[in-house]
Amino acid sequence: MPVELRKRKAPAAPPAPAPPAKKKTKATKPASSKSAPSKSAPSKPATKPAPKSAPEPAVVATTKKAAAAVISKVAGAVKEAAPAAPATNGSGKVAVGDAIALDGFGGEVETQDGTKTTLKKLVDDSKAGIVLFTYPKASTPGCTTQACLFRDSYAPLTATGLSIYGLSTDSPKANASFKTKQNLPYPLLCDPKATLIGAIGLKKAPKGTTRGVFVVDKAGKVLAAEPGGPAATVEVVKKLVGGQNGVPAADRPEDVKAEDKAKAEVAADVADTAAEIDASGTKK
C-alpha cells in the first residue's frame, strides 16, 4: 500500500522584536526673522489752518464795555462789603478833629468785672462821648495819683455827659483790686493785647503803655488825644467840659492858666519819678 505523505505545517515565525524607543529631541525654535524696517514715505508737512477772521470792531467794543461794567460792579460790591477803615491824620495815629469809624475800632476789651465790650458800645451807652485815660500799671504811685485825680474831679468832668474809663493792659483781677482799694467811681478797662491802646496812639514800643488821655464824642469825632502826666491828663478833660469852679477855661485869666499848667507839669514829674522808683524797687 503506498505511504501517504502529509504536509507538515511550517513553524510559526518568531515575533518581530519591538522597535527601539526613539530619543526625544529638543524642539528647535524657529529662527525669528527680523524684517528690516521699512522706510516709510516722508510725511507731508501739516497744512496750517486758515486764519480766523478778526471780530467786527462793533462786537469788540461791546464786549469791552460789558466787561468794564462787570468789573466796576464787582469792585463796588467789594468796597461796600469791606469794613470802613478809621480816619486818621495819615501818620497812623488819631489826632484831634479826626472822625473815626467806631465799628471795630480797637477791638474788644474787658471791664474789671469780666464784661466784654468795645469802644462803639461804650460810646453808644454814653450821653455825650467817653474819656479814656491810659496808665502803665495798676496800683503803682503814678497811676494811683492819676486815677485818684480823675476820682476827685469825677462830678465836674462828667457834668456834660462824658463817661470816664481808665484803660491799661492789666488783668481784670489787678484792675478790680485797684478800683476797690482806691474807691474809684468809674470802670477800669483791661486791654492785655493793647489793641485799643494802640489804636488811640498810646502804646509804647516795644511793650508798654504811655500815660495819656483820649476823648471821643458820640459821632466819633476825636476831641483830645495826647500823652501827659497824671494831672495834665485831667486838665485836658477839664478844659473840654468847661473849666474849673464853673468858670469856662477860655474865660479864665492867662496867669491862672499858666499857674495851673506849671502845677500840672510839676505833679506829673513827681508822679512819674515815683513810678520809676517803685518799678525799679519791684524788679530788685
Image (cartoon, helix red, strand yellow):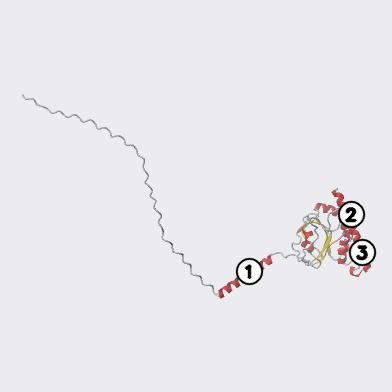
Quarter residue 256 falls in: bottom right
Residue 126 image point, x, y percent: 81, 63
Quarter residue 17 falls in: top left
The three-letter amino acid code for the residue at tag 3 is Asp
Q: In this view of the protein, can residue 174 be seen by the observer?
A: yes
Q: Earlier in the sequence, mark 1 or mark 2?
A: 1
Q: Residues within 10 Å of mark 2 (few under 14, many from 20)?
A: some
In the picture, measured across the screen, residue 15 lies left or right of residue 262, that is left
Q: Secondary structure at mark 2?
A: helix
Q: In this view of the protein, can residue 183 be seen by the observer?
A: no
Q: Residue at x 87, y 66 (%)?
A: 239
Label 1 to label 3, Cα distance in Å? 60 Å
Which residue position is annotated with label 2?
274
Residue 149 image point, x, y percent: 89, 59
Of residues 8 and 261, which is closer to you in this image? 8
Q: Residue at x 92, y 68 (%)?
A: 254
Which residue position is annotated with label 1?
71
The three-letter amino acid code for the residue at tag 2 is Ala
Q: Quadrant of the N terminus?
A: top left
Q: Secondary structure at mark 3?
A: helix
| Circle number at residue 260 | 3
Label 3 to label 2, Cα distance in Å? 21 Å
Quarter residue 165 falls in: bottom right
In the image, residue 21 sits, relative to residue 169, either above or below, namely above
In the picture, measured across the screen, residue 40 lies left or right of residue 150, that is left
In the image, residue 62 sits, relative to residue 1, either above or below, namely below
Frontmost of labels 3 and 2 is 2
The three-letter amino acid code for the residue at tag 1 is Ile
Of residues 264 and 181, which is closer to you in this image? 264
